[in-house]
Amino acid sequence: MMINKLNNLVILFLIVNVGFCIAQDKPLKIKSERNPDNSVTFSYTKKSPGSTYIILKFKELTNTSSSTIRRTINGRSGRLTTLKPMDPKSGIGFSYSYTFIDGNSRAKPETDFKYILPFKDGKKITVRTLNYLGKKFGNTEPKNWASFQFLAEPNDTVYASRKGMVVKIVDEFNSDLTAEYNFKNKSNYIIIEHEDGTLARYGVLKKNSIMVKLGSKVYPLTPLAIAGSYDKPENSQLRFSVYYLDPDILELNNNKSTLKNQKHYYIYVNPLFYNGEDDSTTKLIPNNDYITFCNNAIIEAEMTKREKKKILKK
């Protein structure tokens, strides 16, 4: 998807990654194993080290009873559930299907948490808010929609705004110097999961500039990548949003979605940011300038005692 620049309108459509058992790249696999006591254990392996919400549905069951499993799983592997036979002398007959999506269904977002602006300390940065593109096609906005565009200079470093773990990296797209774009969905990005279950997406990153790995732990002011552009270097930017999985999800739609009918599975957060040379915070106002502020106290705010000890030794 690409959108040529029209009247300088700033727009954004966030592609939601919903996976299904028939997905070609198979970011998550379910394996069943029959045990000596005729029970059946279901385990998973997945590419993301972060939280994933899975819905496992059973059908055509014999010699057992079970309901749909809805669960948040973590790490790259683990046990999902075990079916027990009603008659321990006989095996279980079953078939199943599953869907999944990134995020933690038990997220407890700290909506008053104070983030740092994702650039070097003391840098002046201009911010714009991003409209939800789906509205132009008759869709509704995701809950509490909030997303930002930071206008960067070529080769500006992007830093982590908060402690978390890198759970997704896309680093395969080059800028297109033949045209100018207001938005392209094919851009490089990083997703970081925070301890409260929120996810932060850092988008439009320069190819081959990413400085962290999948599973890396980051802290405020950890360098992540170089700000990129859809087209010319002078249009360098960062697109940033914080969101979490809607806890009321009961089903995941496996039908092909469009801008008009795409389902919304995430709730957005409009974060507080530190601004200036003290610890004052603010909600971002479009077309305003802000100054990144960070100090050791902010960096260490979410660290464990062990992490503080380790970091201070460096």
Image: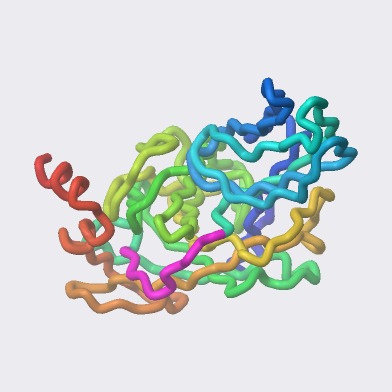
- What residue is at 36 percent from the left and 70 percent from the top? 113
Nearest to the observer: residue 116 or residue 9: 116
257 or 105, which lies in front? 105
Percent across and percent down for residue 223 are 31, 45
Asked if one can make out residue 26 in the rendered structure from this viewpoint, the answer is: no
Looking at the image, residue 314 lies above or below residue 135: above
Residue 207 visible from this viewpoint? yes
Task: Kindly identify the residue that appears in the image at 90 percent across and 38 percent down.
Answer: 60
In the rendered image, the vertical position of residue 61 relative to residue 304, given as above or below? above
Drawn side of residue 52 relative to residue 136, left or right: left
Task: Tell me if 105 is positioned left or right of 139 in this view.
Answer: left
Measured as percent of width and height from the top left, residue 68 is found at: 75, 50
Over which residues does the magenta segment extend?
106-116
Q: Residue furthest right?
A: 60
Q: Residue furthest top?
A: 36
Residue 247 in percent (x, y) is at 61, 64
Residue 288: percent from left, percent from top: 39, 76
Quadrant in which the C terminus is drawn: top left
Q: Is residue 109 magenta?
A: yes
Residue 62, picture quadrant? top right
Q: Label the magenta part by its dominant secondary structure.
A: loop
Q: In this view of the protein, which residue sits in the foreground, 132 or 207? A: 132
Q: Tell me the residue at 21%/74% (across/down).
A: 279
**Residue drawn 58% across the image and 58% down it:** 105
Relative to residue 222, is residue 152 drawn left or right? Answer: right
Residue 247 counted in the magenta span: no
